[in-house]
Amino acid sequence: MSEPQHGDARPTHVTETLVATGAGMPGAFAAPTTARLGWNADLAVTELYSLHYRTLVRLAALLVRDTPTAEEVVQDAFVAMHDAWQRLRDAENALAYLRQAVVNRSRSVLRHRTVVDRNLVKAPPDMPSAEHGAMVQLERSAVIAALRGLPVRQREAIVLRYYADLSEAEIAAAMGISRGAVKSHTARGMTALRSALERE
Amino acid sequence: MVRSGHGSDGPQGHEFAEFVRHSLHAAADQLEPSPDGLQQIRDKIRSRPAHATARRFWLAGGVSAVFSILADLALRWYAALVRGWHALRHGHTAPGTHRAKPDHPRQAPRPRDWREAILRPAFAVGFALFAVGIVLATVPSIRQEIGQSVGFGSSPSRSTPGSGSGNSGSGVLGGGTQVATTSSGGTGPAPGATCPSSTASSQAAASQNVKKSSPAVQSSSSTPPAVHNTPAVSSSTTGTASPSGTATVTVSPTVTGTKTVTKTVTQTSTPPVTETKQAAPTPTGSCTSSPAQHAGPAVSSSTSKAAASKSASPSKSASTSASPSQTASSSSADTYSTNQTQGSEPADSESSSPAAGS
């Protein structure tokens, strides 16, 4: 695979950027303005991993409701980003690509899970795993439980807007829809969420 | 830029939005991904190129097939054109005129020349090659992968040292492994892989020295050389022994910091010693190896002949001007795959210099 040969041109201020943005915090969704050209694909994966992996996994976990699956989704997104780095060549583009890949793959996982659940024979209850415990802890939130009942698009819009703190344009880019559709999905989702919480 | 949750929801909507935001953060921030995520991504990336390469080769094959079909069509058109031209040249009338005269006797098919017979396949092969060339020229990734599969290409990005939290300063595919720039057999381990730049510089110096000393070696007899490096001095030894018994030994003590003193010693039966002092900057600051690893002189020899070429001759040790505190990068190689390392770092590169006089 051909990659830009700029491995030695790594900016020295990436570490400061990492500290300033706070890896793993929601603010890390904002692309570091200092991370620009000069990365090759491997370095970009490493840096973007340290900056955004945790947040992307949490975002995916809110969408797919499963931490291992969320990790797999995000890892696949990173692999795809690595393959597409020659086209991206920029940290901001790469982050937008990662977000879109995570949303699309989460959607695919949910679609696949729907098909599997439809044909699944009920298994006897087994010992709960650690991930199951974490998800139970996650499901304790009433908002998360209500979010689970929303349609996929509305859930994506709400999670991207209120967890990832993205703008409408960024949500539109990540979901592959228009800004008007983002507004519509968000408004309907919030209405449904509010009514579901009031019912409880 | 209007951020989410601000603005158009009204006071109640704003409060509810804040509530949803806090709930989402409180719920999701409990989740901690596994710490080996980067390693898993590396593994996935590492396992992908085979599939990607296969897919691209299939793509290239498909493009070539399409171009071959197009070439065949072009050849058919060209053959029809040639037939028409021959018909006109030999005074025959056009096909429409033939239809106007149905009683005209039809000519027997002309026997095909062998050059005409191979014209179409040759044209098709040429066109297919042209198409493959275009594909390779327009898609550099395929070109690079083909080069890698053939063996003469290398991806520097695979060994690009990177950094990042939890990565111990390596690229995503690097993992601390870098391509050692050895050109000879490499029977032993190549610790020089941790310092490719100094390897390159020492290789260049070694090649220069060998080149300078080649005339003396050509005029030498078969007396085995005797070269000795003082163990107390951190220095490097690059020995090149030709099958005829002559040898060129390059002593390259490298001073950590700014200078490299390269000393070339060529010993023959009439020992003409060529000394070349060469000051060259070497980035050996990061190449200092741990003392535990190189506490003593490590000698690894694969042949007894090479071991014999390292016999003691104190005449060379006095000329080395390295202080005991110096850190030397050493390189040792000869055509008999002998590595002799003295000093604070083992042989970091092996350069197979051309055997003089061979």
Image (spheres, coloured by chain):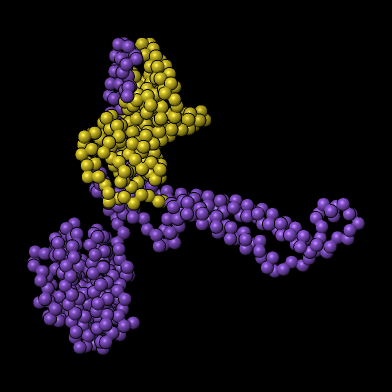
Chain colours: A yellow, B purple
Q: Is residue B69 left or right of residue B27?
A: right
> Can residue A12 be seen in this snapshot?
yes
- Residue nearest the viewer, comparing B14 with A64: B14
Query: Residue B180 is drawn in which quadrant?
Result: bottom left
Q: Residue at x 60, y 60 (%)?
A: B125
Above or below A43: residue A180: above
Above or below B212: residue A66: above
Q: Position of residue B157 (x, y in %)?
A: 33, 52
- Residue nearest the viewer, comparing B73 with B290: B73
Counting labels gives: 0
| Picture quarter with the C terminus of chain A | top left
Query: Residue A99 is drawn in which quadrant?
Result: top left
Q: Residue at x 38, y 18 (%)?
A: A146
Q: Residue at x 89, y 54 (%)?
A: B102
Above or below B224: residue B331: above
Q: Is residue B41 left or right of residue B269?
A: right
Above or below B74: residue A64: above
Q: Residue at x 40, y 30 (%)?
A: A174
Q: Position of residue B165 (x, y in %)?
A: 24, 42
> Can residue B305 be seen in this snapshot?
no
Q: Position of residue B210 (x, y in %)?
A: 26, 75
Farthest-out residue, right: B103
Q: Position of residue B228 (x, y in %)?
A: 16, 78
